[in-house]
Image (cartoon, rainbow, N blue to C red):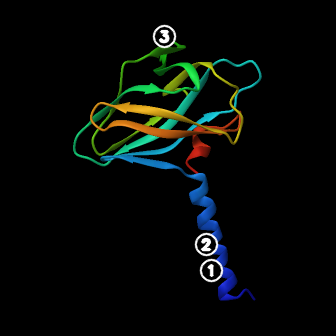
Amino acid sequence: MISLRTFCCGLVLAALSLTANAHEYKAGDLFIHHPWTRATPPGAQNAGVFLLVKNNGDTADQLIGVETDAADKAELHQMKLDNGVMKMNAVTAVDIPAKAETELKPGGYHVMLFKLAVPLKEGDKFPLTLKFKRAGNVKVDIKVEAMGAKAETMHQH
């Protein structure tokens, strides 16, 4: 039989491991959950960054820009189906509606990094500044996940 003390210690360790994997940021009414990217193969010059923004406020906001030293250029992009062809285009802003969640994810809105300064290795982190119209600038750490990481797996953290 397991002792109460052993059980409680196990619960504490489980909780600590969950909080070690999740990383969240707050800016006013905005909560930014788990900003991440995938590790890049040798020679790759570009990468996408993904995250979830939850707006608990009564006022909409917009993500209007991004900035990082990890790449020569960082832009907001959207992928969408156009006459049966998936296309990616730069966008000037991503709407963050009031009382809603906006996910930047593979195949949708995302941050595009061009000419990476160094290859992205699983387990590494690098800073990125999100620029919101109302909430202002928010510096986040981007966690580098495995090459094959998918958006669905990121919500399990």
Mark 1 vs mark 3, foreground winner is: 1
Identify which amino acid the numbered label 1 is placed on.
Cys
Q: Residue at x 66, y 86 (%)?
A: 5
Contact (CB < 8 A) between labels 3 and 2?
no
Residue under label 2, please give it.
Answer: 12
Element at badge 1?
Answer: helix
Element at badge 3?
Answer: loop
Q: Earlier in the sequence, mark 3 or mark 2?
A: 2
Contact (CB < 8 A) between labels 1 and 2?
yes
- The image shows residue 18 at horizontal and vertical percentages of 59, 59
Q: Is residue 106 above or below residue 19?
A: above
Which residue is farthest left? 58
- The image shows residue 101 at horizontal and vertical percentages of 38, 42
Q: Residue at x 50, y 26 (%)?
A: 111
Q: Is residue 123 left or right of residue 52?
A: right
On-image quarter of the N terminus:
bottom right
**In front here: 129 or 93?**
129
Residue under label 1, please give it.
Answer: 8
Identify which amino acid the numbered label 2 is placed on.
Val
The answer, for residue 108, to whether it is visible in the render is: no
Tag count: 3
Mark 3 vs mark 2, foreground winner is: 2
